[in-house]
Image (cartoon, rainbow, N blue to C red):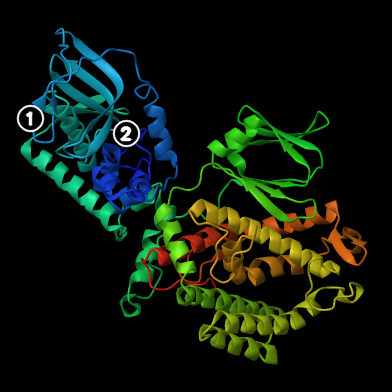
Amino acid sequence: MISPSDPQSSSTAHSTAATPGAARQSSTSSGSEDANQLIPVRMLNEFTYCPRLGYLEWVQGEWAENIETMEGTFGHRNVDKPDRKSIPARKKSNDNGDRDEVQSDSANGDSIHARSITLSSDADGIVAKLDLLELDGGVATPVDYKRGQVPDNPEQSWEPERVQLCAQGLVLRANGFESSQGVLYYIASKRRVVIPFDDALVARTRELIVQFKQAAAEEQIPPPLEDSPKCPRCSLVGICLPDETNLLRAPEESVPDGNRIRKLLPAKSKALPLYIQHQGAFVGKSGDRVTIKLKGEELASVRLLDVSQVCAYGNVMFSGAVIAELNRRSIPIVHKSYGGWFHGITTGLSHKNVELRIRQFRTADDPEAALTISRQFIAGKIKNCRTLLRRQLGSTDDPVIANLAEYRKRALRADSAETLLGLEGMAAKCYFEKFFPMISGIEHYDVDGRNRRPPRDPVNAVLSFVYSLLTKELTVTLNSVGFDPMLGFLHRPRYGRPSLALDLAEEFRPLIADSVTLMAFNNGEINQDSFIARAGAVALTDAGRKSVIAAFERRMDTEITHPIFGYKVSYRRVLEVQARLLARYLLGEIEEYPGFVTR
């Protein structure tokens, strides 16, 4: 990731010399490997800018693009291409500061400019990919490209940039070169700023290296910055959730009134799911677009930039080129049966946040810890069911409102998973007794309570279908956050079941799925012609399914005021925020998982 080195600056984006998350990946192997893990100097830049940012990127393997990172990558397009120049090796310093002869070649005295060179220093524990190396005999000057303009401050540079450059100088010294200064080249200004590697800068650089290694070894993510102007332009702000985490960490008595949470997240993403339900359709790639064809005729063409996931129903084929491109862009392909049964997902490599998955597995294996989280899921679900009924009934006098409030209180005190599930079942029975009569024309659908596998009436067919859409959505979200969606805390593991997605879906069933069902029936978007009955089982037709998907997407795109943070976000974004708050809880940053409940 590339973040601005300062809010006022326009720093650079550049490729990393090591894979983000490498610290955690190696820490699972052996302690000696931990000690020898080299810190990429680009990550040292991030740690200097914000210790939490450095930890998120290097230890947890998090990454997100924004306009600054993309501009930085574009600005580095030339220096990121390695050339074929031969660079004479020098005498290399060992860990004791002595020098061992590595190669007897000597420089011929000519100046050499070389791009994209990777060197390391075992003594300092760092590795650097140099944008440009200017070599004059034994004197080496690293040149680091920065995206923006020369900062308007006395140093004409920001500390993270100077530290990164100095670390490159230390690497060069360790490899036998003389390096007393470096150059920051600001692309927008087309100016070079010389940075001397004086004793103070060298000491500061080595101090930060030690602090970074210590943070990684302690496996404790640094706290978020408080009300920092650095956050709005950081590409990882949606992952870090600085203001949200600080609010949930603060004691209640220290939280002042008023809206103090900055809206650092966009309300909604412009990229949306692409649904394909034409049987025999072929999905391919043409330039930067996804194409959908049937018997050679193009049905649709969508920009890859506008696609967040591809949902294929039944017999849909994909070309190797489009699968590779979707994987490269971290766009999952969700596979569903023709009837809507969620049975698979194609993604790129697993998320690198191994630390989170370790905590998830530990918690799932601890019955009491799992029960603590499960109480929040079920209590949230019951409260949201109560809210939906209260709004639809227009009164709080109905006994079901009081009953659901009581079930919620008892759920928060449940002393076992079995008790909790029993309370959830009793609350659901009360809820659906009032829910079904809210469906317009319910007398035509022969509904006899909640039923499934297979649903035996149109209303339950829609409920089951929308629940599967919600589960699919949460599986994709949890996967992107770094969880294993198959291991839950309330729903126990079962082959092929995304248990954690089902857990988190509980609090959103009334808010999203049940609301979509009400809208689809009561607005006349589906009717009796939208269903087909076979031997007592009822399913949606193609047209009926298309109408329900449209209603579901409208609901996911609806903006809602977050009950805790006060800003407006879409339901799709809320799912991500809740998943990240669950991660913050499991990683020990906040004391309680806050369920999402509306007022």
Q: Secondary structure at mark 1?
A: loop
Which class describes the residues within 10 Å of circle 2: few (<14), some (14-19), or many (20+)?
A: many
Q: Quadrant of residue 247?
A: bottom left
- Seen at 52% across and 51% down, the residue is 480
Amino acid type, mark 2: Gly
Q: Is residue 405 above or below residue 106?
A: below
Quadrant in which the C terminus appears? bottom right
Residue assigned mark 1: 98
Task: Report whether 529 appears left or right of 221.
Answer: right
**Residue 497 image offset from top left, x and y in percent:** 64, 60
Q: Quadrant of residue 295?
A: top right
Amino acid type, mark 1: Asp
Viewer-side residue, 47 vs 186:
47
- Seen at 84% across and 51% down, the residue is 542
Residue assigned mark 2: 148
Q: Secondary structure at mark 2?
A: loop
Q: Is residue 151 above or below residue 116?
A: below
> In 3D space, how far apart are the residues under numbered discs 2 and 1 (Cα atoms)?
40 Å
Can the viewer see residue 263? Answer: no
Marking on residue 432: none
Q: Is residue 410 above or below residue 543?
A: below
Counting residues from the start of the chain, the first of labels 2 and 1 encountered is 1
Which class describes the residues within 10 Å of circle 1: few (<14), some (14-19), or many (20+)?
A: few
Quadrant in which the N terminus appears? top left
Q: Quadrant of residue 39?
A: top left
Can the viewer see residue 495? Answer: yes
Task: Report whether 379 appears left or right of 388.
Answer: left
**Residue 513 image offset from top left, x and y in percent:** 69, 66
**Residue 262 image offset from top left, x and y in percent:** 40, 60
Viewer-side residue, 101 vs 306:
101
Viewer-side residue, 146 vs 17:
17
Task: Report whether 532 appears left or right of 213.
Answer: right
